[in-house]
Image (cartoon, helix red, strand yellow):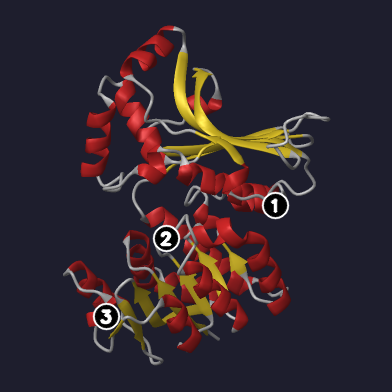
Amino acid sequence: MTRRIRVVLIGLGNVGRSFLDLMIGKADLLAERYDLELLLTGVADSSGAVMEAEGIDPAVLIAHKVAGGKAANFLGGVAGVSAPALVAQAEADLLLEASAVNLETGQPGLDAVRTAISRGMDVVLANKGPLVHAFAELESSAKAAVTGLAYSATVCGALPVVNIGQRDLAGCDIRSVRGIFNSTSNSILAAMTAGGSYEQALRQAQLDGIAEADPSLDVEGWDTANKLVIIANSILRQPSTLADVQPVIGITGITPAQIQDGAAQGQVVKLVARAERNPKGIANRSVSGRFRLSVQPEWLPVDDFLASVNGWEMGIVFDTDIMGLQQFKVDERGPVPTAGAMLRDVIDLMMDDGR
């Protein structure tokens, strides 16, 4: 018998709309393979919200959004209704949080997640903000409420970094983590390696839809730092915030001349996130926990695995005690793979009978 899951979606940007496309395109697969049906009962964006217990047609909503519409002026939409307010009222079993990242407060996504958990709803996140600001709180409250909290889409999109670290490396002592977690900065560095200036590479990335109009989160290293904080909390089990990532240095200071000099020495520059074991007895009081977290450009030898992570790609290296060196990368283009990771989390939560 097909199980109907009522879902609320927060965020109608590229990832949110891509998830709506997947609700349509994967409906038969969900029914045939997993006996699941997703029913959209609420949607919110920055303009307001729509709530309909009988279901909102994803195709009609996508067409409305593509035509320049917003949740507030969709049929039945109400201007000014916040995401947490929608979650508090909607008839739903599952929250999908795909709103924009707010580094300062994590809002409104954080309160939307808190509200969903308090109502006993499962939660799937693509938005990193709530986890960066309140990982321990959300994990603890979800456990107490016996609800699911999944967030594999928050770290490298479709690349299952969180799943690998939590499940597939079970029993391992992870000695270090290195990764390239931001495809925008990686693609800009690739374009500069090919001979362009930083400004030219950034402009092309914006025209291609890779970079945002304000690319600061990506090129200054903060998007990468967000993902490293989530890895530290969820995989390394080290309570961490952005303040624990030191330093955070982006790619804006890298010049074509430096790239050419590095190439002459057999080196490639990459924006690398690291979680390295702290030496015993370390005297630096600014460093806490078992792992030291950092984000900064590094000059890597060309035979390093991360040096092969090029263009749009993202990648990660786990150094473990009993499972060796685990190396993964993904060539991810556009928002669909991240929406696909959200769908993966939905399926995992719904098929988990152990809760």
Q: Residue furthest front?
A: 285
Which residue appears at 57% of the width and 47% of the height?
242
- Nearest to N terminus: mark 2 or mark 3: 3
- Image-quadrant location for residue 186: top left
Alpha carbons under labels 2 and 3: distance apart: 23 Å
The crowd level at tag 3 (other Cα within 10 Å; few <14, some 14-19, many 20+) is many
Q: Is residue 30 left or right of residue 177?
A: left
Residue position marked by numbered label 1 in the rendering: 239
Q: Are marks 2 and 3 in contact (CB under 8 Å)?
A: no
Three-letter amino acid code at the position of disc 1: Pro
Q: Residue furthest left?
A: 67
Q: Residue at x 79, y 36 (%)?
A: 322
Instruction: Give SS at disc 2.
Output: helix
Placement of 252 over or under 131, stated as above or below = above
Label 1 residue SS: loop
Please tell me which residue is depicted at 47% across the width and 44% down the height of the picture. 222
Which of the two discs, 2 and 1, sits closer to the camera? 1
- Mark 3 — residue? 72
Q: Which residue is mark 2?
A: 339
Q: Amino acid at mark 3?
A: Ala
The answer to which quarter of the image holds residue 143 is bottom right
Residue 287, given in percent of the width and then of the height, sits at 70, 37
Q: Compared with residue 89, is residue 293 higher up or lower down, i.e. above or below?
A: above
